[in-house]
Amino acid sequence: MDAREETIRAAESYTAKGFLCSEAVLLALGESMGVESELIPRIATGFAAGVARTGNVCGALSGAVMGLGLRYGRDAPKTEPSRKPYWYSRRLAEAFEEAYGSVTCPGVLGLDVDDPDDYRRYTEKDMWATKCREIIKTSTGLAYDILQDEK
């Protein structure tokens, strides 16, 4: 098994242990880079389910953005003449949107998990297992690819 697949499997393993989408992706990407911190997964918790079921950016995508930030994020306020400091987030968001047609949790799932009727459909269809875990794997893989391309 190659390192990309190991990273994706790590994200799957974290979800199986009960971690949320944003947490699982960040944990797996951090692990793949050798980054350990007591702040991971805590900093990712609030981003799950489209930022606390508000219908915003998919938690798996948010976790992947944070994971890329572990390598490419800034440590000081400065300007970079040739590249915006958030290029990696843009590249990831574009790839994610190409894969799913949206970057929001409701756009990707086709329902709003904050709406009681939609949440009932989400649980009845076991979308955590059938849809969200696939999105977690895809987000992890897309972020991993960016990490490799930019080495």
Image: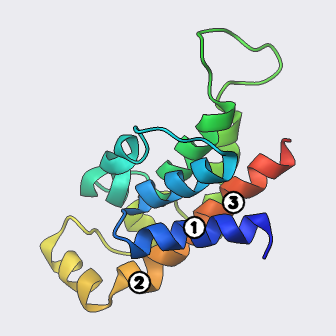
The residues tagged by marks 3 and 2 sit, at their Cα atoms, a distance apart of 20 Å
Which is more foreground, mark 1 or mark 3? 1
Relative to 88, say whether 128 is above or below: below
Q: Residue furthest top?
A: 78
- The spot of residue 99 in percent (x, y) is 64, 69
What residue is disc 1 on?
10
> Which quadrant of the structure image shows residue 88?
top right
Count of marks placed on residues: 3
What residue is disc 2 on?
129
Quick check: 86 left or right of 80?
Answer: left
Going 50% across and 72% down the picture, which residue do you hit?
Answer: 13
Mark carried by residue 142: 3
Relative to 107, say whether 103 is above or below: above
Going 20% across and 64% down the picture, which residue do you hit?
Answer: 114
Mark carried by residue 74: none
Going 42% across and 62% down the picture, which residue do you hit?
Answer: 21
Determine the secondary structure under disc 2: helix
Going 60% across and 36% down the picture, which residue do you hit?
Answer: 69
